Amino acid sequence: MLIMYNSWAATQSSLATYGTISAAVRILVDVISAVIVVIVILQIFNISYAQAILPFTTFLVAFSFALGPTIQRMIDSLLFVAVIAPMDVNDSVSIPSINGGATLKVDKIFLLTTEFIDGTNRKIIARNSDLISQNIVNLKQSGSVSLSCKFTVTAGSATPETLAQVKATVLQYLLDHGISWKPKLSLSVAASDSNRLDLTFSYTHNNTWSDSGKAFADQTHLVLFVTDTLKAAGLEYRNPSSNVDVSLTSAGSSLQAAREQATAAAAASTAKPQAGAAGAQLETLLELLNFLQARSAAGGGGSGADAGDADRLADQSGLRQRRTVGGGDSR
């Protein structure tokens, strides 16, 4: 039911668009017909064209200066909609001058303007006279999504046999995932410098550009497979440069784990001085308890030196601290 409704809505929008264009064409035809009728009447009554048009010359010149740009825009808009026709209702397009080149959906097409809907459901209205000079990428009318990924490997480890084996393995991956990928793979090799080679894998997805989201998600898994294949073949490579979905890669989880490890290490380095100070204070406290226990076993007496040692240990252990309260000392 929803599909039928969407189809009916699209048909209605298209008919409304064509109705507007038809009305404009009818007006243009009526104007041309009126001019032809006037010329025929003048010819029948043997009236000179120059004598008939001369009184209106000044008016025509002023009229052309005033409405010339408007007439030019109308002609450009008519050519854009009726002759060039680069898009239709419900097409997904990308125009560099509108919304930064983001993907737009064509909602309605009129003679002078075209209405688009962007990804945030905002309506954007553009003049057809401006669109006629723009490069319009029609994603719906485009073909399948063709993608590629690039690796830089060490020249010494990249033998022809190894590269052929890598290409065969990646091609087998495309064959095993035929629902997503076409069974076609191109591998180009170019020397970046004397010690490195650039490997470019080119492949085609079954989806069109109007549904390119799944293509980029599938490319993420394909790039990871190519990475594992190069690693298994013993090739030293650099990270690929390709359009992948980072949220699907293991690199995202690795970065998160590394970030957590860095946070834990920072917390541990902050806690170490505190733990060291607490340990030293505990050792001093144990030493004080042993000292007091020894004095108690000796009969509770002690010399002034013993009392001084006890005061020193009490101060180091933190059991006794001097604080100034109201100008005096309290213990």
Image: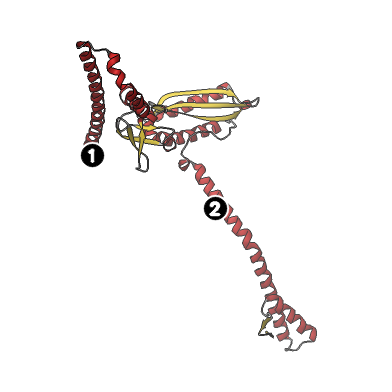
In which quarter of the view is residue 331 placed? bottom right
The residue to which callout 2 is attached is: 260
The percent position of residue 220, horizontal first and vertical second, equals 46, 36
SS of the residue under disc 2: helix
Identity, as a three-letter code, of the amino acid under mark 1: Leu
Residue located 27% across and 17% down the image: 52
Q: Gap between marks 2 and 1, in whole Å?
A: 47 Å
The location of residue 168, given as percent across then percent down, is 48, 24
Single out the mark in the foreground, 2 or 1. Answer: 1
> Which numbered tag is attached to residue 2?
1
Task: Tell me, yes or no, if residue 315 can be seen here.
Answer: yes
* Secondary element at image label 1: helix
Residue 99 rendering spot, x and y as whole percentages: 42, 38
* Image height of 315 relative to 61, above or below: below
Q: Which amino acid type corresponds to the residue marked 2 in the rendered image? A: Glu
Between discs 2 and 1, the one toward the N terminus: 1
Q: Dot 1, how many residues are within 10 Å of its Cα: few (below 14), some (14-19), or many (20+)?
A: few
Left or right of 230? Residue 309 is right
Residues at marks 2 and 1 touching, judged by CB atoms closer than 8 Å: no
Question: Foreground: 59 or 235?
Answer: 59
